[in-house]
Every structure is written in C-alpha cells, then in structure tokens.
Image: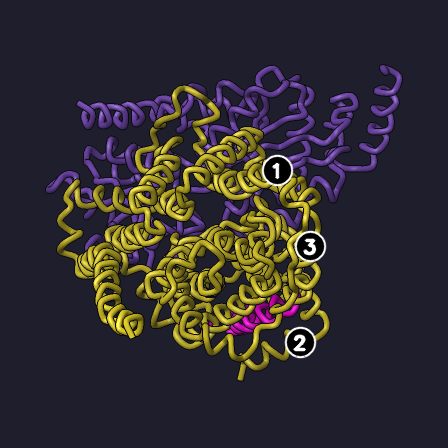
Chain colours: A purple, B yellow
Amino acid sequence: MTKLTRRTALKLGAAAGLMPFGLGSARAAGYPEKPVRTIIPIAPGGQTDVVLRLLQSAIDKQKLLPQPLVVINNAAAGGSAGTRLVKDSEPDGYTIGVFHMGLLTAPAMSVVDYDHGAFELIGQIGRTQVGMGCMNASRFKSIKDVVAAAKAKPETITVAMNIGLLPHFVPLMFQQDAGIAFRYVQAGGGAVRLKSLLGNHTELSLFSGPEFLLFKEQGLRPLVMFSESRAPELPEVPTAKEIGAGTVFEERIIAFAPKGTPRGRLDAVAAALKAAMNDPEVDARYKGLGIDRVFIDGPKLKEILDGLRGPINKVGDIVKKARAEKKG
Amino acid sequence: MPLLDAFIHLLTPQAFVILLAGVALGISVGVLPGITAGMLMALTLPFTYHMTSVNAVTLLVAMFVGGVSGGLITATLMRIPGEPNAIMTCLDGYQLARRGQPGRSLGLGNASSVVGGTLSWGVLVLLAPPIAGVAVALGPFENFAIIVMALILISSLSEGAFLKGLSAGLLGMLVSFPGIDESSGMLRLSFGFIALEGGLNSLPVILGVFAVSQVVADALNIEERTDAIESTMRGIFVSLRDYAVHGWNMLRSSLIGIWIGILPGVGATIASIVAYTTAKNLSRDPDRFGHGSEEAIVAAESANNATTGGTLIPLLTLGIPGGLTDSILLGALVIHNLQPGPLLFKNNPEIVNTIFATHLVAHFAMFAMMTLGITVFARLMRLPRAFILPMVIVFSVLGAFALNNRAFDIGVMLAFGMLGVLLELAKVPLAPFVVGLVLAPVAEAELRAGLMSSAGSFEPLLTRPIACTMLLLSAALFVWPFVRERRRASRIMALDQAGTSPVNQGGIR
C-alpha cells in the first residue's frame, strides 16, 4: 500500500514539475486519490455557486489536482444542513465546503451553535464589497440624509433585508455605529430586494458592488459603501468611515474543511484553488461578475474572521433581544 | 425585422441543433422528479461560457421550456410530479390514463402546453415593457391577497366533503411549518431533531402522498389487477373539435398562467393550482375533477406553460427573476456582459429577439418531441403493474434524494406515502392538502413582510385598493360554492316537482 502511494506521489511529483502551482499536490503525498466531495450549502446558480463551479472546471481543465472536485449542493435549512455535513465528515481531505459569510452569521441567529472556528479554513476564494442604496427617485440624496431622517423619526425608514444574512446584519451594524434605528422588512435575494425598492415597498437595502452596477439602469443608487476605502468602480460613493460610522464589512467566499484535516491536504486544495484563480479565463469571469479575485490563505483568513466575531455577536444580541421582547 | 432575423438564425443548423438539444434535455429532467430544470441549467451554465451569447441564451431558454413541459409524462403515467408544476396534472391526468386513455390524457396535456406557451409568447413580445411595471407595483399585501384568493379556492376542491377538504388543507399547511421560519430566521417545530431543521420539503412530501401511496395501494391488491387494463393509444393527436371544446378553458387558464408568471416569486406550480380550481368552479361538470377530468388537465397544463412567457417579462425588462430558472438565465446574461433591464432592448436587441424567437420555436420543438415521446411512453400503461411499481419507487427515491442530496428526504417521502394511503382510505381529498402545502409558506411570507413594513398594522390590507379588491373577491369565492349548491338543490327540487307530475300522470294513464 505504501509502495503504491509513493509511486503515485512520484508520478505526481513528475507531473507537478510540468505544471505551475502543482507543487502542492506533491507536498500532500498522493492526495487526493479519489474525487474530493465539495459541499456547497446553497442552491445552484447563486454567486457563490457560480464561483465554485468556475474554479472547479479550471482545476479540472488544467489538472491542478490529480482528482476532480465534485460539487454537491445541499441547500436545506438555510445552509446549516450543508455546513453541518462538512463538520461531521471524516477530516481526511475528501470532504470540503464552500460558503459565504452565512458561515459566521448562522450562530448569531441561534440556528447552529458553531461558526468558522469549528472548521479548518482553506482560504478565501473571492470577495465583494457591499453598501446600502436607494432608488434615484428616493427622498434621500446622500447617506447623511438617511442618518438625519432616521434620527428625526427612529424606526420609520424601511430596509429590505434577507434575514440572518449580510443584508440583515450589515445594516444592523451600521445603525449601531451611526446611532440610528431602521425598520426591517424581510424580502430575500438581491433581485427581490430590488423589486421591493422599485415598487416603493421599502426605501433602503444592502447590495454588493456588482449589484449596484448591474441595477444602475433600473435606477438603483448606492449611498454608502462598507469598505476600507472607496471602491474603484464606485468612486463617488463615500464609505461609512468617512461619515464617522466605522462599519467595515465585506462578503467573502470561504473554502473550509472538517476540523483536524491534515495541513498538507488543506495546502494542496488551497494551492489548486489559488492556481485556478490565476487562470486568465477565471480572471475574466470574476471581472464579469464583479468579484475581487483576492486569495487569502487559511491562517490569515482565520485572523480576519475571528476579528469579525465581536461585531457579529453584538448584532446577534440585538436580534435576540428583539425576539425576547416580542415573546415577553 | 430583427425578430424575423432571430427566427431565421434559429433555423440555421448549429443554432437549431442547440435548441433541439436544450429542449430534449429539458424534457428529460422534466420527466425525472427531483431533478429540476433549474438544476440542469445551473449545471449547464459553465459550458455556456465558451459559447456566443446568442447560442448560450438559446440553449438555456430551450431547457427552460422543455423542463416546464416534461413533468406531464411522469405525472400522467406514474402519478409522479416530474416537475413541481405538474402536481395538478397528477390528480386528473393519472386518473384518465388509469381508466384506459393514457394517449388522450397525454395528448390533451401536450396540446394545452403548446397553446399556453404560444399565448404567453404573444403577451411577452407585444406587451413586455408596459406590463413590467405591474410586477413591481404589487407589494407583499397584494401578493398575500392573491394567495388568499387561491387558498379560499380549497373549499371548492373538497369534492362535497367540506370538512374533510378543509382538514386536508390545514394538514398541508401544518406540514409546511417545521424548519427555519423564513421571516424571522428562527427554528420552529423541529423538536430538537437536526434533520427537521431543513423542514419537510414539499417535493418528497408530494412524491410520498401521490406516488408512493399509489404504489402501496396497488401492491395491496395487485392480484386483482393482473388483467392489464385495456388501454387505448387513441387521442394522442388532439382534433380541431377538441380545441373548440376546450378553447375557452385554454385561453382562460393561459391568461391566469401569464398573469401569475409576471409576479416574481409566485410561480408555475401556483399558476396551475389557480387555473385548476378556477376551471373547477366554472365547470358544468365539477364533480368530474379529481377523477380524470379533461378540463382539469387542460387547465393545469395550459397554465404552467403560460408562466414561461410571463416570468420572462420582469426578467428582461427589469432584471428581476421570478424563480430559480430565471435567476440562472439572469446569471448567464450577466456572465456574458449583458445587463437585463431597460437598456437590454436598446443595446442588445439581438439577445432579446433570440430569447423571444427561442421561446416560441422551443415550444413547437417541445410539442413535436413530446408527441413522439408520448407514443412510446404511453405504452407503459399496457405493461403489467408489477413491472411499473418498482420503477415508480426507484424514480421517487432518486428524485427525493437528488433534490438536496439528503437521505432524510427519502424517509420523509416514505412516511408521507403511508399518510397518503391513510388519507385515501379515509376518502380525504388530496388536492386541498397539496394546495395548503404549497400556498401556506408563500402566504405567510408575504403577509409577514407586509406587517414588518407597516409595523404590525393590518390596515393596508383594507386601504390598498388592489389588496382590498382581492380580499373581497376571495370572500365572494368562498361563499359561491354554497350558493351554487343551494341554487342547484332548489333547481333540482323544482325540476323534480315539475318532472314528477307528468311521469306520474303518465303512470296513471
């Protein structure tokens, strides 16, 4: 058995010499010997799903791993069924997961009792900036108008949200930081929230940078972005920092594996994903989707995500308190 | 004429092959339960990166049309909803096939599909921009009122036994509750079972109640059924006379389908439910519904295909997809650097026209392929049940699993199979159960979204004109069956009185 593995490893090593970025495969000594099950806890077709499938086909085409990634969608229970499946799988590198920041917000909603800390992080494979916006016809001309109106009449400005996910949490964080309060209305995904704004059923909502560009013709206007500095594609939109509310938050696409998966195997998958991200065609598609092609490795990503626990939990407490009040 | 150019382009060999392949693949996943057209399109998306945007759009729209239509076959022959929107076809299509007319049942469904699709195409091409505003103007309160109207119609599906129908409807609603509450993000009724956190998905439940329960019931008395039912293949080709007889129903159901298709997030399943119940309420022969009524098949199949044109309207004019399949189409457009919305018509008329042309040609291709397919598949009805039943179970298990890759869903399906047997034994009608199951989550989500925006006030239900009108209409619809029953009873009494005397007189003489 050892012989076989070593032989495979040798073969791989030789193959790796012919390919850029193939080194990771050699490091993991024969891994993977069978297809890697990649659980994605959302339905097919969403942005995270599209990104994963792009990388999967690039890995396959360029033979960045000796075995393919097999993508399995498990969208049940708002994603928690899928993440739980990864958490409870053998930590042998043959089951991995890919999800967005829902991985961090689910425990704050008390849907599950674990966050990214329950996994080994492989890396970040994409990132988008997010911001809040309204329709062109809106009474708000700038984010300062919003803050002023909210201070005058708290809890009257309606925000279309997607409960438990960023369009819910980020506005909550912003209202904390700006010392105001919104009224939240459940809508759903980006297009549904746009519909709600278009029909004048709500006034504000969170969108990603690419969504602002995509829906521009329909009259959607960004008011504030929650990035460190102004987004290059939306240079006229101020950041929350600029108006004194320090909210900084981004949507991240995260690859992860069960706790205890050997470092070498995590590195092998990370190297393949990173190499796939450098594929010129993948690059073009990321640009088309408006996703930042920034790879961040596991340990560094863990640091960033750990830092977000505080603000997320703070918001989670507000949600829990509101529920308790409703019950009481 | 750019639209004409798009048609001519579609008939060039390469484009035509892509279209045929799309329709054929769409129909095949439509036939299989659990594997939806949405999944097929999502899996196909990466392959379209290398195509021209015109070809990519052709392929995806063809799959979309094929997928909506294929569900008819399994619904009719096996009582399996191959696509969720074929649920209502399971009710009557299967009964008619079972009574020895599988060809007729499939033929009618197929003809209605193509009529519904073509009518919706007309609306799409002629009225897309003016109608688009309607899609967004209707908010949560209006959508809730529309769903209530559909829910009220449950009472008319109860086949006489009003209480049984109502309980079945409420049971269906109850089944939709466990899992994550979409409006508050909280878990409810999961009783601490992790598997229940995902809720009871409607597909495994429906597969259980319809397909598995039928298999169990058939297996129990398999001996009695060894004499294969004499079934005729006649009726696959629907005659002009049929179009005349069912014309009004096709038109009405198609309009319902188009209208519901335009409303984002409501969808083809609900369209066929509304068309079905409306047809029943207006029928001269409402007692036939649920027992193989031709009108029922026509209504359900015209309506679900008619949504295809409807959903494309908000997608193309506003960039708002109505459901999973449309969002994938949206994704495909975006990835090809095409921005759906008001400018798409100005900047990329070739894409808009390709979508228009494909939508129509795909419907005709679908009709031809389904007709061919039907002639083959309808013969399944001639096989002894002993060969069919295992196939039904295999398909159902695969479908329940494929939906979310969860073994738990297979268990759900089997459990609801048993429940289905009990319901049938107790003569509880299945239609209200399904309607409750499918509509309750939508009604709940819309009402709660409305209440969130009004800070808990129900007032907008009465002050918003469309919502209020819809609710009044619902009230009228609720009362109507009772009034009709009354009037019929009094008419029969009157007839009896008028009719008996001459007979009696005749008897005396």
Contact (Cβ within 8 Å) of mark 2 with mark 1: no
Query: Which comes sooner in the sequence, label 3 or label 1?
Result: 1
Discs 2, 3: same chain? yes
User: In terms of depth relative to the viewer, which is nearer, B81 or B184?
Assistant: B81
> In which quadrant of the rendered view does residue A239 lie?
top left
User: In terms of depth relative to the viewer, which is nearer, B172 or B105?
Assistant: B105
The disc placed on residue B423 is none
The disc placed on residue B11 is 2
Count of numbered marks? 3
Please indicate whether residue B218 sits to the left or right of residue B386 in the image. left
Q: Which residue is mark 3?
A: B382
Residue A316 % position (x, y): 31, 25
In the rendered structure, does residue B364 fall within the stretch colored magenta?
yes
Please indicate whether residue A228 sits to the left or right of residue B210 in the image. left
Contact (Cβ within 8 Å) of mark 2 with mark 3: no
* Residue depicted at x 60% and y 56%: B73
* Residue depicted at x 61% and y 15%: A260
- Residue A135 visible in the picture: yes
Q: Secondary structure at mark 3?
A: helix
> In which quadrant of the rendered view does residue B212 lie?
top right
Q: Amino acid at mark 2?
A: Leu
Q: Secondary structure at mark 2?
A: loop
- The Cα–Cα distance between marks 2 and 1, rounded to whole angstroms, is 49 Å
Q: Which residue is mark 1?
A: B219
User: In terms of depth relative to the viewer, which is nearer, A161 or B297?
Assistant: B297
- Letter of the chain that mark 2 sits on in the rendering: B
Q: Amino acid at mark 1?
A: Ala
* Residue depicted at x 75% and y 37%: A20
Magenta span of residues: B345-369
Which quarter of the rendered picture does the C terminus of chain B lie within? bottom left
* Residue depicted at x 61% and y 48%: B32
A118 vs B169: above or below: above
